[in-house]
Image (spheres, grey):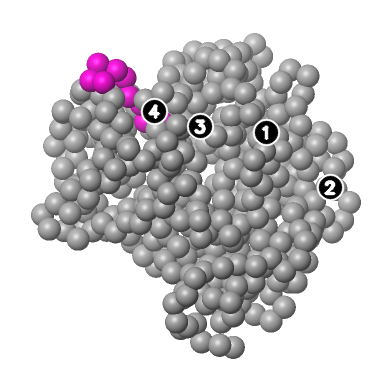
């Protein structure tokens, strides 16, 4: 095995053969598989890569064989999306299979570099993705690519259709897959029945839902289509800066101290509002992905397979957001997250049932926390990943993720139109370098 310390050179990945299809190892349910209204909320693909410093002999074939086995338990991944008579999406569970790609790189894992900073030009080479599709219906529910490096390192690239699962459900799947690969029994069996999240009869919207737009969201809207080229950028926030932000937030009145995610969310909301130069009198919104699983009484079953997230909505005028103390924004974020109860989620489910409402986009951004997900526990038998990172970012979304397996640093990744990102970068650099604190690193890629 060659040492992972080669000289720097252009990074390249070569697919070894045509795309294969991995089908469930046994016969599974054949028919229509219900999707809840929460599954319709975020119709976008998500791409993520897992970098392992060392693999093992026959790792690719081992992964492929175990994928067929785990698809027996998680059979919806092997199906495809369709539409019902009333315009809702549904899965045709037909055992069609999951696209699987073998690839190689003459680079080393070291030459891959720090993947925590989003770089679609490089990292999308490590994921099998389907571009130029007319509809989210044409995006596979799951794809897998295994790239072997000359030093023995391995990168697992996964693309999921968010219509089927959220980050928590994907992490459950990956950890179950790794257990099967190591010959272990599943620690938790997936709970596949999504009818527990069906709309009430009759539907009842008893809570305001400013997170939605009251109109049908077309399935073709898999991209927000900003008029300018997008700039992808990541920022690294160290614990020292998080502590400073929390101290600043304490100027407000809180029943409990604000969390790291709440202060980061408030900061990104303020900076983005400034970067887009939203008019002072207009309302600006931050939609926060909140895991609804523990909000139910009783909580949703462990290893619930599906979208369990609901979006809270922090909102105020742009003038108040940018002119009032930082604690003002943190308090709004804090209170909006608290509002997500079982009643809130049930009302949101009913809202979609009656309106087919899509997430608000105008003067709005979304944020999701991946830092608590168990991605760094995914061990197929050759150790846990050294780094986990998105290969791309949906245009209106901010993702937060740990910088590495043992790191306490947070990486904030997003994509903005070029002119807005220029301002955003200057604002963030000024904020993160305040008091000569060297807490910011960044990298920019244009598309």
Frontmost of labels 4 and 2 is 4
Q: Extreme left residue here?
A: 435
Frontmost of labels 4 and 3 is 3
Asked if the residue under mark 3 is in contact with the one under mark 2, i.e. CB atoms within 8 Å, the reply is no
Residue 33 drawn at (x, y percent): 77, 35
How far is the residue under mark 3 from the one under mark 1?
Answer: 13 Å
Disc on res. 364: 4
Which secondary structure is most common in the magenta stretch? strand
Res 30 quadrant in image: top right
Residue located beneath label 3 in the image: 224
Residue 60 drawn at (x, y percent): 70, 71
Residue located beneath label 1 in the image: 134
Q: Residues within 10 Å of mark 2 (few under 14, many from 20)?
A: many
**Helix, strand or loop at disc 3?**
loop
Frontmost of labels 2 and 1 is 1
Q: Residue at x 33, y 42 (%)?
A: 421
Q: Nearer the viewer, residue 71 or 276?
A: 276
Mark closer to the chain start, 4 or 2: 2
Frontmost of labels 1 and 4 is 1
């Amino acid at each position: 095995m060659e040492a992972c310390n080669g000289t720097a050179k252009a990074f390249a990945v070569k697919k070894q053969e045509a795309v294969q299809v991995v089908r469930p190892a046994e016969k599974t349910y054949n028919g229509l598989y219900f999707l809840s209204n929460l599954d319709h909320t975020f119709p976008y693909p998500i791409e993520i890569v897992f970098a392992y410093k060392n693999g093992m002999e026959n790792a690719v074939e081992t992964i492929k064989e175990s994928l067929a086995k785990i698809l027996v338990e998680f059979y919806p991944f092997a199906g495809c999306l369709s539409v019902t008579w009333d315009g809702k999406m549904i899965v045709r569970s037909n055992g069609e299979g999951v696209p699987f790609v073998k690839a190689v790189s003459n680079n080393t894992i070291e030459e891959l570099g720090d993947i925590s900073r989003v770089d679609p030009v490089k990292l999308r080479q490590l994921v099998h993705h389907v571009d130029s599709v007319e509809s989210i219906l044409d995006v596979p529910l799951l794809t897998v690519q295994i790239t072997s490096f000359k030093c023995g390192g391995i990168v697992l690239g996964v693309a999921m259709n968010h219509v089927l699962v959220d980050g928590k459900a994907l992490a459950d799947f990956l950890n179950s897959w790794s257990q099967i690969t190591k010959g272990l029994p599943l620690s938790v069996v997936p709970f596949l029945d999504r009818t527990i999240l069906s709309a009430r009869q009759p539907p009842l919207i008893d809570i305001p839902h400013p997170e939605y737009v009251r109109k049908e969201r077309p399935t073709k809207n898999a991209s927000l289509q900003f008029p300018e080229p997008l700039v992808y950028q990541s920022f690294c926030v160290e614990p020292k800066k998080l502590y400073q932000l929390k101290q600043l937030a304490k100027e407000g009145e809180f029943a409990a101290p604000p969390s790291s995610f709440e202060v980061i969310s408030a900061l990104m909301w303020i900076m983005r509002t400034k970067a887009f130069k939203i008019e002072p009198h207009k309302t600006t919104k931050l939609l926060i992905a909140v895991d609804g699983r523990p909000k139910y009484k009783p909580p949703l079953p462990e290893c619930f397979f599906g979208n369990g997230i609901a979006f809270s909505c922090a909102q105020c005028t742009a003038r108040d957001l940018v002119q009032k103390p930082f604690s003002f924004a943190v308090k709004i974020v804090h209170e909006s997250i608290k509002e997500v109860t079982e009643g809130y989620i049930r009302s949101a489910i009913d809202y979609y049932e009656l309106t087919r409402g899509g997430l608000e986009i105008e003067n709005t951004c979304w944020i999701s926390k991946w830092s608590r997900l168990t991605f760094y526990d995914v061990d197929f038998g050759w150790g846990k990943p050294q780094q986990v990172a998105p290969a791309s970012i949906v245009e209106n979304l901010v993702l937060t993720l740990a910088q590495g397996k043992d790191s306490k640093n947070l990486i904030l990744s997003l994509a903005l139109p070029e002119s807005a990102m220029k301002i955003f970068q200057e604002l963030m650099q000024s904020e993160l370098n305040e008091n000569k604190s060297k807490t910011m690193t960044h990298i920019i890629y244009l598309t």
